[in-house]
Amino acid sequence: MFEFLVTGVRMPQMNGIGAAIQICELLPKCKVLLVSGDNDNSALLQDALSRGYKFEILPKPVHPLELFRSLYSVKT
């Protein structure tokens, strides 16, 4: 069983938000954290929100302490 998913937003063939939604459907207790180098992910976040999912996106580069803090504050 996976406890966390940390993934980028922009990926070939599927974006990280789509992957996060699928993981949440398969593993509802898995915490999801997204990271992105893009400044504007609002359309992707709005799509997720319309499906009932709210995700946090941390800007790259992510300091390890910020990653740790975010992982342990993400709500399932």
Image (cartoon, helix red, strand yellow):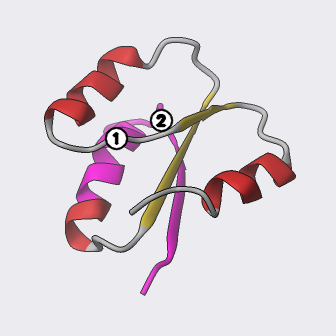
- Report the amino acid beneath label 2: Val
Residue 1: % across, % down: 42, 87
Residue 74: % across, % down: 52, 56
Q: Which residue is mark 1?
A: 54
Q: Which residues are magenta?
A: 1-22
The residue lying furthest to the top in this view is: 40
Which residue is drawn at the image coordinates 37% and 36% (left, top)?
Answer: 15
Q: Is mark 1 in CB contact (under 8 Å) with mark 2?
A: no
Left/right placement of residue 73 relative to residue 19 reads right
**Helix, strand, or loop for circle 2?**
loop
Which residue is drawn at the image coordinates 52% and 68% (left, top)?
Answer: 4
Residue 6: % across, % down: 56, 55
Left/right placement of residue 46 relative to residue 71 reads left
Label 1 Cα neighbours within 10 Å, binned few <14 / some 14-19 / many ≥20: some
**Helix, strand, or loop for circle 1?**
loop
Does the magenta run of residues contain 2?
yes
Q: Is residue 71 above or below residue 50?
A: below
- Report the amino acid beneath label 1: Lys
Left/right placement of residue 33 relative to residue 43 reads right
Which residue is drawn at the image coordinates 45% and 58% (left, top)?
Answer: 75
In depth, the one of 66 and 62 nearer the eye is: 66
Q: Which mark is residue 9?
A: 2
In the picture, residue 44 is in which quadrant?
Answer: top left
Q: Is residue 70 above or below residue 56?
A: below
Which residue is drawn at the image coordinates 24% and 57% (left, top)?
Answer: 22
Left/right placement of residue 8 relative to residue 65 reads left
Does the magenta run of residues contain 61?
no
Residue 61: % across, % down: 78, 33
Q: Which mark is residue 2?
A: none
